[in-house]
Amino acid sequence: MTESSHNDRSIGEQLATLQFTASLPESVRDALAEIATERCFAAGEFLCREGESTPELFLIAAGHVGLDMLVPGRGQVRVLTLGPGEVLAWSAVVGNHGATATGVTTDEVRAIVFEDHVLLSLCQTSHDVGYVVMRELAKAISRRLVATRLQLLDLFEEQSPS
C-alpha cells in the first residue's frame, strides 16, 4: 500500500465523479475531501478480513476488490466483486465491530480512504454531512444486500442435486 500522489485529479474532483459521492452537495464533498487520503494497493492485498474490525472506510476510485465469505463446507467463496464508486468496510462506521466479508484486491486499486472515527465524528458534528453520507451508505448497503443475495442464490443452485 502506498500513499498516492501521482493522480492529477484532487480527491474533491474524484468525489464529484464516483457513484457513492457524485450526488452529494458540493459542500459535503468538500468536507469529505478534507478528511480523506488517497492510497494505492497492489493486487492481492487485504483491505479487510471477515470478523475483524476495520478502522477505515474505502471508496474505490479505480480497480476491483473481491468480497469473500467463509461458507461452511466450502471455505472462502467470492460472493461479489466491487469496482469504482463502491464503498468497502462500512461496518465500522455504522457500529458493527467486525467486517462482514474479506476484501481482497483483484488488481491494482486506488482508493479514497476515510478513518472511521474521523468520518463518524464529522457526521455527528455536522448533521448536514451526516444525513447525506448515512443516506448514501444505506443505499450502498441495500444494493450490496441485493447483489449478495442473488450471488448466494447462484451458489446454492450450483450445489442442488439435479
Image (spheres, helix red, strand yellow):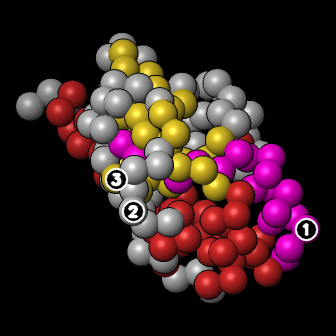
Name which of mark 3 and mark 2 comes first in the sequence. 2
Q: Which amino acid does label 1 sit on?
A: Thr
Residue, disc 2: 8
Residue, x 60% and y 34% (percent of image)? 99
Q: What element carries label 2?
A: loop
| x and y, in percent, of residue 10 in the image | 50, 66
| x and y, in percent, of residue 139 in the image | 54, 69
Between residue 45 and residue 147, name the one nearer to us.
Answer: 45
Label 3, label 2: how far apart the Cα atoms are: 14 Å
Nearer mark to the viewer, of 3 and 2: 2
Q: Which amino acid does label 2 sit on?
A: Asp
Q: How crowded is mark 1: few (under 14 residues within 10 Å), some or many (20 or more)?
A: few
Name which of mark 2 and mark 1 comes first in the sequence. 2
Between residue 129 and residue 155, name the one nearer to us.
Answer: 129
Magenta residues (range): 109-127
Marker count (numbered): 3
Q: How crowded is mark 2: few (under 14 residues within 10 Å), some or many (20 or more)?
A: few
| x and y, in percent, of residue 77 in the image | 33, 27
